């Protein structure tokens, strides 16, 4: 497999700590050849770490996009800039992978999906939780538990004051709907919907616990799955006082259940019980998942690499349409909460 040349736009924390290590671990697939950042000094230090020559540290996003040496763009920007860069890349015929959430609001998200539907240029959203090995393992056992009728999704934890991401001003003063609820919540929704399907309607209450969050930072909700009798609950927030970090998805079928535990992200556990009732319950089966160390990031770039190399956007797993749905769920949490928990339909593309 020959490496594709990547231009990185937005050389902040996650470009340096999340994406670059994956590119450097897989030189057969990825070569970072250019960088642009609003504050140029950050792009220069990123370039040094990535081995990018100084003449490829650009003064504008457009110059990087137009560089013929760049095969595709990896953009890590606050969500309100995603639509602009996707439009620029499509106009230049350049594939682009943007970070989640897909956009700052549903209008932008719709415009972004419209733009990507009208082109063959591959565009993907970096929702790395869509690529977890734990999902692959759980999917193998799903048919064994019969019809899926219910679920509990819980991702809660303590507030971390010295969180490197907390200090970013665009998170503290979010222009994107949901603030932290969409920042991290779309990952949870990617995991949930990959296993139980699209969400039809939501009843939710949200609340702001921490001033530093800039917007509501916890949600408790009930959910109905589309075209299914499956119902469930979804709780999310890392704004609490001292408590365990507790991430799990339990899926109930009429012939058993599956529990996915992600408390230890390096070593998820999938537990399966098969049987139609208490009298016919099999022994618990425990599957320890060898989660890839980047927690889905390598798999997402591997997937995008194939789509770009084969010029086939249909290969993309983390599509703009899927990410539209995840942001639409967050929008529905907020709308429902504004209406005292009334059930609201999730906007469809
Ligand atoms: N998938 C995940 O698990 C995960 C984890 C963390 C972050 N992320 C995503 O990664 C992206 C970056 O997050 P981060 O944590 O790395 O934050 P960050 O360090 O603040 O990076 C944001 C970058 O955007 C740039 N930027 C800000 N305003 C801009 C503008 N008007 N025009 C062009 N560039 C602008 C910043 O440049 P300056 O430094 O010059 O302001 C900075 O390089 C976000 O989309 C975030 O959601 C994803």
Image: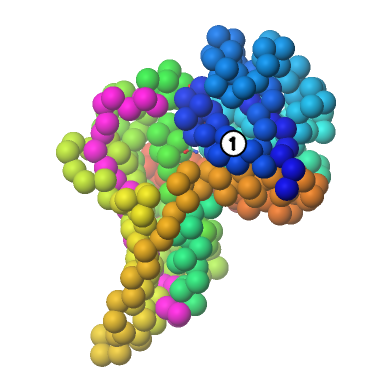
At mark 1, the secondary structure is helix
130 part of magenta stretch:
no
Give the x, y percent position of residue 279: 26, 90
The mark total stands at: 1
Q: Residue 303: x and y, percent?
A: 65, 50
Quickly name the residue at label 1.
23
- Residue 152 image-quadrant placement: bottom left
| Image-based side of 73 in relation to 191, left or right | right
Q: x, y (%) of residue 263?
A: 31, 51
* Residue at 32% across, 50% down: 264
Asked whether residue 22 appears in the rendered view, the answer is yes
The image position of residue 136, as x and y in percent, is 51, 63
In magenta stretch: residue 154 = yes
Residue in the picture at 73% in, 48% down: 1
| Left or right of 115 on screen, residue 213 | left
| 191 lies above or below 160 | below
Q: Residue at x 47, y 25 (%)?
A: 13
Residue 238 quadrant: top left
Is residue 57 positioned above or below 105 on the image? above
Q: Residues within 10 Å of mark 1 (few under 14, many from 20)?
A: many
Residue numbers of the magenta segment = 144-166
Instruction: Determine which quarter of the picture holds residue 127.
Output: top right
Which residue is located at x 21 percent, y 46 percent? 244
Q: Considering depth in this image, is 302 or 107 the residue closer to the camera?
A: 302
The reply to whether residue 99 is in sight is: no
Of residue 208 and residue 256, the one placed in the foreground of this image is 256
């Amino acid at each position: 497999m020959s490496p594709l040349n990547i231009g990185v736009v937005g050389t902040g924390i996650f470009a340096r700590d999340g994406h670059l290590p994956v590119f450097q671990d897989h030189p057969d697939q990825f070569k970072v050849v250019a960088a642009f950042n609003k504050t140029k000094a950050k792009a220069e230090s990123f370039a040094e770490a990535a081995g990018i020559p100084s003449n490829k540290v650009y003064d504008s996003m457009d110059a990087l996009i137009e560089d013929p040496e760049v095969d595709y763009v990896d953009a890590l920007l606050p969500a309100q800039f995603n639509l602009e860069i996707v439009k620029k890349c499509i106009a230049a015929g350049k594939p682009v992978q943007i970070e989640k959430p897909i956009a700052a609001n549903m209008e932008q998200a719709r415009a972004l999906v419209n733009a990507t539907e009208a082109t063959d240029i591959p565009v993907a959203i970096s929702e790395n939780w869509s690529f977890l090995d734990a999902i692959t393992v759980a999917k193998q056992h799903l048919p064994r538990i019969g019809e899926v009728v219910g679920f509990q999704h819980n991702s809660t934890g303590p507030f971390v004051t010295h969180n490197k991401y907390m200090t970013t001003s665009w998170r503290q003063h979010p222009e994107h709907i949901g603030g932290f609820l969409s920042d991290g919540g779309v990952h949870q929704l990617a995991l949930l919907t990959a296993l139980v399907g699209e969400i039809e309607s939501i009843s939710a209450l949200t609340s702001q616990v921490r001033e530093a969050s800039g917007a509501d930072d916890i949600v408790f909700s009930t959910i109905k799955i589309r075209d299914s009798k499956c119902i469930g609950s979804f709780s999310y927030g890392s704004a609490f006082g001292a408590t365990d970090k507790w991430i799990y998805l339990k899926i109930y079928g009429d012939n058993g259940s599956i529990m996915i535990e992600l408390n230890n992200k390096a070593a998820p556990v999938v537990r399966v019980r098969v049987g139609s009732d208490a009298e016919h319950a099999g022994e618990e089966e425990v599957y320890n998942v060898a989660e890839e160390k980047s927690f889905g990031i390598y798999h997402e770039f591997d997937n995008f690499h194939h789509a770009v190399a084969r010029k086939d956007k249909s290969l993309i797993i983390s599509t703009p349409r899927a990410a539209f749905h995840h942001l639409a769920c967050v929008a529905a949490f907020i709308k429902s909460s504004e209406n005292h928990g009334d059930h609201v339909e999730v906007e469809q593309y």
